[in-house]
Image: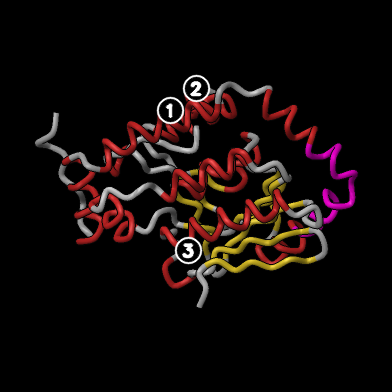
Amino acid sequence: MSHVLIAQAGSVLEVIFNRPEKKNALTAAMYGAVVDAFRRADEDPGIRVVLVSGTGDSFTSGNDITDFQARSAADEASPAAAFLDALSSLAKPLVAAVNGAAIGVGTTMLAHADLVIAARSARFVMPFTSLGLVPEAASSLLFPALVGHQRASALLLLGDPFDAETAHRWGLVNQVVADAELMTAARAVATRLAALPPAAVRQTKDLMKHGRPNVAGRIEQEMAVFRERVRSPEAAEAFQAFLEKRKPDFSGFS
């Protein structure tokens, strides 16, 4: 079974995280499939909009910890870095339909979406520091600009969770709908975008993105620190505690 489903409906390309038994936790293979889909979207003039969603009761619970540790131990090139590059440089408009858990990159990726529709069940959290890590996807740059420094500190330093209504109030989400209406609402928005003059839409997105600070530079800076943190004793303790379903002990670290 494919863990990323790709379906085209008219000029909308749907990219669907499809690992519901693992809360759509992302593996290297899943990142690669999404990167391929984004590249296909930008290269195919018949595709005007990308819509990303998740099956089951979660959008995505972030990185699969076991897969993540295996890649780090092997010192492989990061498929997550390739995903972030493809995400941040996607020329076609991106719509996200978010239900249930959006953890880690499941939340940070939304700062790169052009429109976000959330189900009332959506719950967002960026627990990087509790895992001995640092934020990625230029979230250390984009979230303070989006929600303000103090709120971003609570989200990125403390890892405070927040719900769909809060995300809407703070500007991360465009619309909150009933869970049963999520895909209908998201597809309606994607269809509206797809019906507009495509070059005008792409150029408008490009103009707005170039009004931002240096996202690519921040992603590179974050990833350099992130790679160091993945190999840190703090991260090792956090990951082991997660796998053993216990509370991590950071009392011996300074």
Q: Do the CB atoms of the residues marked 3 and 2 lie less than 8 Å apart? A: no
**Quadrant of the rendered structure where residue 54 is?**
bottom right
Q: Which residue is mark 2?
A: 149
Q: Which residue is mark 1?
A: 153
Callout 2: SS: helix
Q: Where 62 sits versus 197, above or below? A: below
Callout 3: SS: loop
- Crowding near the residue tagged with mark 2, few <14, some 14–19, many ≥20 C-alpha atoms within 10 Å: some
Q: Which mark is residue 24?
A: 3
* Residue depicted at 44% across the width and 48% down the height: 80
Callout 1: SS: helix
Mark 3 is on which residue type?
Asn
The stretch in magenta equals 187-202
Task: Tell me the mark number nearer the camera, choosing from 1 and 3.
Answer: 3
The quadrant of the image that shows the C terminus is top left
- Crowding near the residue tagged with mark 1, few <14, some 14–19, many ≥20 C-alpha atoms within 10 Å: some
Residue 36 on image: x %, y % = 58, 57
